[in-house]
Amino acid sequence: MKSNQNRHITLIGAGLAGALLATLLARYGWRVDVYEKRGDPRLKGYEGGRSINLALAERGLHALRLAGADDAVMAQAVMMRGRMVHFADGRTALQRYGRDDSEVIWSVHRGQLNVVLLDIAERAGARLHFNRALASVDFDARTACLADDRDGSSHVIDFESLVGADGAGSSLRGAMKARCELGERTEFLGHSYKELEIPPTADGGFSIEPNALHIWPRGRYMCIALPNDGRTFTVTLFLPNEGDPSFQTVRTGADARALFASDFSDALPLIPQLERDFERNPTGLLGTLYLDRWHLDQRAVLLGDAAHAMVPFHGQGMNCAFEDCVALAEHLDATDDRASAFSGFQAERLPNARAIQAMALENYLEMRDRVDDDDYLLQRALERQLAERHPERFVPRYAMVTFQRLPYALALQRGNVQRELLVELTRGHDNLETLDWDAVDAIVAKRLPRLPAGTASPL
């Protein structure tokens, strides 16, 4: 612990990352004020913006454990063992994420999670201020103006440092851009999404297998469904913005029904309010936000989606943001020099954020194009074999990202080598029985160094 003098910090945004960081810093002995533009969701209910279900994995769970929030969150989570692939011919097959039920991910509801984290932050001693939107910042005077949209009033606060946990549309990032070059750029995916819902069965049960992420891959587009603890599934339809089919051609509920009848026929009976949901729910955009700089000396720093928003196809956006929170809290606790803490945080996390952003984009192509491809399935089978034969060297990239806390950048680098191996070793083979396993083992040992101690698969 460093000196308690001036250990006060101001967070902008009381979403998932803001609430978690507030708890971690309060536990380190900081005085924390959190300002949120929305009302308190514990009083007025959760106001969804992006409501794609969240996939909680080991990185996020580690952060929740540090905050003492894991038990409350896991009480509401639904286990997902793998991808339940719904093929175009009506077949289904479960592609496990890990070796067994010790390697799974968890579906959590964004709103419920936010409420749990706010309660825990408040109990830890953080002061939460709702209906306070950041309107402007005077970085020289160290003051910020906050607006209450209920009555139009303004409130000026003093600050030592501001932390932007206010999402991809960050107001703090906008204020920082006026003072320094952040190198901001956003690359949109060219695809968007629409949310639908599978309700419970008449007797209150799940309509389809609850412990899986369901996916209907159809090449340039796809549909997924994640379970909720209320026995519903949140269904997300991903379509291109242009072409056929796309959100240009699928405009009405009737258009959506025709698309499902043609391409997702086994899902259609499960979504009784398809037309209503399609027409009422907004179309969500998908993009990747890149920044070259995350901080303004000792006065402000960004994390989570405010610094590196990503597409949701690796289920790591929240997990990465939670990992940011742990790293920033540790950097701040290690020194009284906030500029040094912020720059050290950026140096540690920016390369890893870039890596998971790249892997999230790659995973979209895999989910929509490859999970029903014969070559891919053979490579997955070899991947499992190599993980069993060489647990100290070969860990599937998904496992490195999801079940371990190996730096994302290292997982990306090793994953690229492993993918090249899988393609090379399966080329010209229809099954694994024709492989020369002695030669395979020698190639793996030559090209893949041993993993850092403590990270190999515990088979």
Image: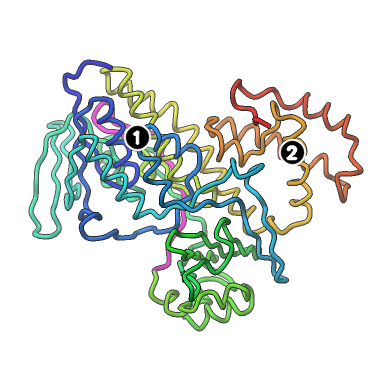
Disc 1 residue type? Ala
Tag 2 residue: 420
Q: Nearer the viewer, residue 119 or 28?
A: 119
Q: Position of residue 179 (x, y in %)?
A: 25, 36
The residue type indicated by label 2 comes to Glu
The image quadrant that residue 350 belongs to is top left
In the foreground, 350 or 296: 350
Q: Nearer the viewer, residue 375 or 136?
A: 375
Q: Name the residue nearer the viewer: 86 or 228.
A: 228
For the point 61% across and 52% down, the residue is: 82
* Distance Cα–Cα, label 1 vs label 2: 39 Å
User: Which residue sits at x=38%, y=53%?
Assistant: 110
> On residue 191, which mark appears?
none
Which residues lie in the magenta part?
Answer: 282-302
Q: Which residue is mark 1?
A: 67
Residue 93 belongs to the span the image colors magenta: no
Q: Residue at x 9, y 57 (%)?
A: 152
